[in-house]
Amino acid sequence: MSKVNIMGIDIDSLTNQETIDRVEEFIINKKPLHLMGVNADKLNLCKTDKKLEEIVKKSEIINADGASVILASKYLGKPLPERVAGIDLMQDLLKLSCEKGYSAYFFGAKQEVVDKMLENFKEIYPNLNIVGARNGYFSDEELKNIEADIAEKNPDIVYIGITSPKKEYIVQEFLDNGLNSVFMGVGGSFDVLSGTIPRAPKWMQKANLEWLFRVANEPRRLFKRYFVGNVTFIKEIVKEKRSQNG
């Protein structure tokens, strides 16, 4: 499978459907998987957080979950096929799980958000086999109990709605301790799927402006990530382009 290296990370050249097919192979073969999505923010973090960088690099599937990563790949002359948006991939995997009977576990966000999301899922995914769901607020001791619960229930896919790099650290710890599920970090997707936060309209998604909609809805949390972070990302990509040209 071909890969595209951006800022030292080998990103898989996969479409959304190809990713779904690969994830299903891991489920069928009962193999653990860290399904990783990278955007400009995470690639920036990898430059300063070597622990995160190591975790990202060892992930079995690394998707381009960010319009800026797709644009960067084109600028560098090694275009990735498409953006694999985490929330879209998550919803497609939930549909697949309904069709095939794969089990799901949800871990993250506030409890009220989780409850609203599961209530919505009763209508959208009535056949979904949910074996566990809880919020993303916990002590170190509680995390051990969460790990034990996931190990006991052994879900096919665990969706983790916690911010980076915390979620990557947690998933790696679970994998190191022998948990055997597909683990997918989904960031703020629980908030959107619960109806707590709206998603950008389709035209903004297609125009690669979903980030702008998110900043407008959560300016205090996201302004620095997108405006300061994107400047840092652009500088790194320009530097990479210059090094290509000698």
Image: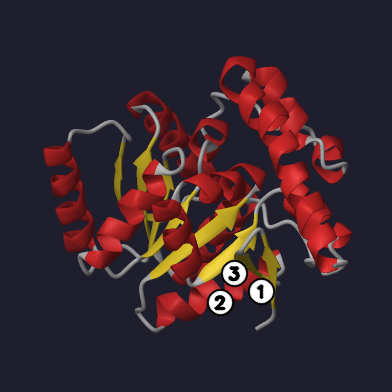
- Indicate the amino acid at tag 1: Glu
Q: SS of the residue at dot 3?
A: helix
Q: How far separated are the C-alphas under marks 3 and 1?
A: 5 Å
Q: Which coloring applies here?
A: secondary structure
Image check: 123 left or right of 234?
left
Q: Do residues under tags 3 and 2 come within 8 Å of each other at their CB atoms? A: yes
Residue 86 vs 195, above or below: the answer is below
Q: As rendered, which of 242 and 179 lies closer to the eye?
A: 242
Counting from the top left corner in percent of width and height, residue 73 is at: 80, 61
Foreground of the two, 178 or 233: 233
Q: Which residue is mark 1?
A: 18
* Residue at the top extreme of this rendering: 220
Question: Tag 2: Cα neighbours inside 10 Å, few (<14), some, or many (≥20)?
Answer: few
User: Pointer 2: what residue?
Assistant: 22
Quadrant assignment, res 197: top right
Residue that appears at 42% across and 28% down:
113
Distance, label 3 to label 2, CA atoms, is 5 Å
Q: Are marks 1 and 2 in contact (CB under 8 Å)?
A: yes
x, y percent for residue 167: 39, 46
Q: Amino acid at mark 2?
A: Arg
Left or right for 29, reference 61: left
Q: Amino acid at mark 3?
A: Ile
For label 1, count other residues whose C-alpha is less than 10 Å away and answer few (under 14), some (14-19) or many (20+).
Answer: few
Look at 71% across and 72% down and name the residue there.
13
Query: Would you identify the image quadrant in which residue 30 lies?
Result: bottom left
Report the front residue among 99 and 179.
179
Residue labelled with disc 3:
20
